[in-house]
Image (tube, rainbow, N blue to C red):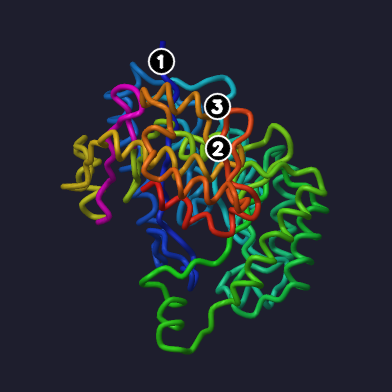
């Protein structure tokens, strides 16, 4: 019986790189550059399939970036068809593609649906044009509304929108309006993220040299809780710290990352996690050099970055299990932890018993129905709590 696998496919191209973005992506590519990359990507997918398809069934495929919607329809079709050829897929495999509103044409959306893509994730960030300009986005709110309508016309019934809060210049009234506009549209999934200052980004450099202030922490937290409240009120289930969905529309692919699921990464800098037994596995990532990647992939050789392979120890695996599991609103299943690691969680972490008890007594953690999970107040200090287990 084949094990279930998530397949992540990285497209590193952007029309213009946003000032806050720390992902592996770059602007300035030509149609020829993108075509050459897509061809190498298809070759890597076939190589991965030759190695892994006998043991795995891909029940989720996620084409992320960057801005995957910059690729031509033909290149995207070729990638999806190659992934399906290289790996067995389920009849209900979730196939997601990320896109920005300005590059989601009606023709592309129709082509996506025709080749089997059934989930769309649109990078939106705000319903306010001034805020979009502050973030360096290349689209307007009207562009998003047009793309959203086109997606519906193309038959998409599983759409995620990304929105952002906690960045300089954003006030509560404007944030509330974004939440109102989004919930009125009723996308099936909404991801809401606080701005993170990533080293090497223009936003980080502006903050470091004093030309940009970070958002007030109390306002940032108030915006977060307002989002959770408004989304719940409108029927969205809060299933992960930064993600809500209508019932049945949780992102299957991302749940693999938060549940120790196995996944393979194809493309520049893409990461993989494969388990050999139990909850222990091996992690590795591809090279981040484009020329090296294309050359190796086209030669049928592995583009894995030298020195990136890491075989998790039991301690590593437990740390990842705890850190990612506490991101889920359902938290840690204590019986599952025991099954994975052969011992009771509180026995393994007995040296931290006072810390865990302290968080439960202050209402930051809760133990209920065989689960250990963060409360809504605990989410505000989640990094502090989760780091106790790393």
Eye-nearest disc, 1 or 2: 2
Q: Specify few, some or many for label 1: CA neighbours under 10 Å numbering under 14, 14-19, or 20 or more.
A: few
The residue at 71%/41% (across/down) is 237
Q: Secondary structure at mark 1?
A: loop
Q: Is residue 372 above or below residue 139?
A: above
Front-lying residue, 174 or 81: 174
C-alpha distance separating marks 2 and 3: 30 Å
Front-lying residue, 388 or 119: 388
- The segment highlighted magenta reads 273-289
Query: For this view, does 1 lie left or right of residue 104?
Result: left
Query: For this view, does 285 lie left or right of residue 242?
Result: left
Earlier residue among tags 3 and 1? 1
Residue 2: give its label. Answer: 1
Residue 288 located within the stretch drawn in magenta: yes
Answer whether labels 2 and 3 touch (C-beta < 8 Å): no
- Residue receiving disc 2: 372
Residue 354 located within the stretch drawn in magenta: no
Farthest left residue?
306
The residue at 75%/44% (across/down) is 236
C-alpha distance separating marks 3 and 1: 14 Å
Q: Secondary structure at mark 3?
A: strand
Q: Specify few, some or many for label 2: CA neighbours under 10 Å numbering under 14, 14-19, or 20 or more.
A: many
Query: For this view, does 354 lie left or right of residue 247?
Result: left
Q: Secondary structure at mark 2?
A: strand
Q: Specify few, some or many for label 3: CA neighbours under 10 Å numbering under 14, 14-19, or 20 or more.
A: some
- Residue receiving disc 3: 93
Q: In the image, residue 244 lies at what x, y percent?
A: 67, 46
């Amino acid at each position: 019986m084949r094990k279930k696998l998530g397949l992540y496919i990285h497209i590193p191209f952007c029309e213009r790189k946003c000032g806050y973005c720390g992902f592996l992506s770059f602007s300035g590519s030509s149609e020829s550059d993108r075509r050459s990359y897509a061809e190498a990507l298809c070759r890597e997918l076939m190589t991965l399939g030759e190695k892994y398809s006998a043991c795995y069934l891909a029940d989720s495929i996620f084409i992320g970036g960057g801005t995957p919607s910059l690729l031509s329809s033909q290149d995207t079709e070729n990638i999806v068809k190659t992934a399906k050829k290289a790996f067995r897929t389920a009849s209900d495999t979730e196939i997601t593609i990320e896109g920005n509103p300005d590059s989601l044409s009606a023709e592309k959306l129709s082509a996506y649906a025709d080749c089997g893509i059934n989930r769309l994730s649109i990078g939106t960030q705000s319903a306010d044009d001034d805020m979009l300009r502050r973030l360096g986005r290349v689209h307007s709110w009207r562009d998003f509304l047009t793309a959203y309508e086109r997606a519906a016309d193309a038959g998409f019934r599983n759409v995620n929108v990304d929105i952002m809060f906690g960045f300089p210049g954003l006030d509560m009234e404007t944030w509330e309006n974004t939440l109102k506009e989004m919930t009125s549209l009723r996308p099936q999934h909404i991801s809401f993220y606080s701005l993170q200052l990533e080293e090497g980004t223009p936003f980080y450099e502006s903050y470091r040299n004093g030309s940009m202030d970070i958002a007030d922490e109390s306002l940032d937290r108030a915006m977060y809780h307002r989002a959770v409240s408004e989304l719940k009120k409108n029927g969205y289930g809060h299933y992960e710290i930064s993600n809500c969905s209508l019932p049945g529309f949780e992102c299957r692919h991302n749940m693999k990352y938060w549940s120790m699921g196995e996944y393979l990464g194809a493309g520049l800098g893409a990461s993989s996690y494969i388990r050999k037994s139990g909850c222990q596995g091996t992690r590795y990532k591809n090279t981040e050099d484009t020329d090296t990647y294309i050359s190796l992939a086209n030669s049928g050789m592995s583009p894995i970055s030298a020195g990136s392979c890491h075989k998790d120890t039991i301690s590593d695996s437990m740390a990842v299990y705890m850190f990612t599991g506490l991101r889920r609103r359902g938290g840690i299943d204590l019986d599952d932890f025991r099954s994975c690691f052969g011992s009771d969680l509180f026995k393994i972490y007995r040296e931290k018993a006072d810390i865990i008890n302290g968080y439960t007594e202050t209402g930051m953690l809760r133990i209920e129905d065989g689960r250990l999970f963060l409360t809504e107040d605990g989410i505000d200090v989640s990094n502090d709590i989760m780091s106790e287990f790393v």
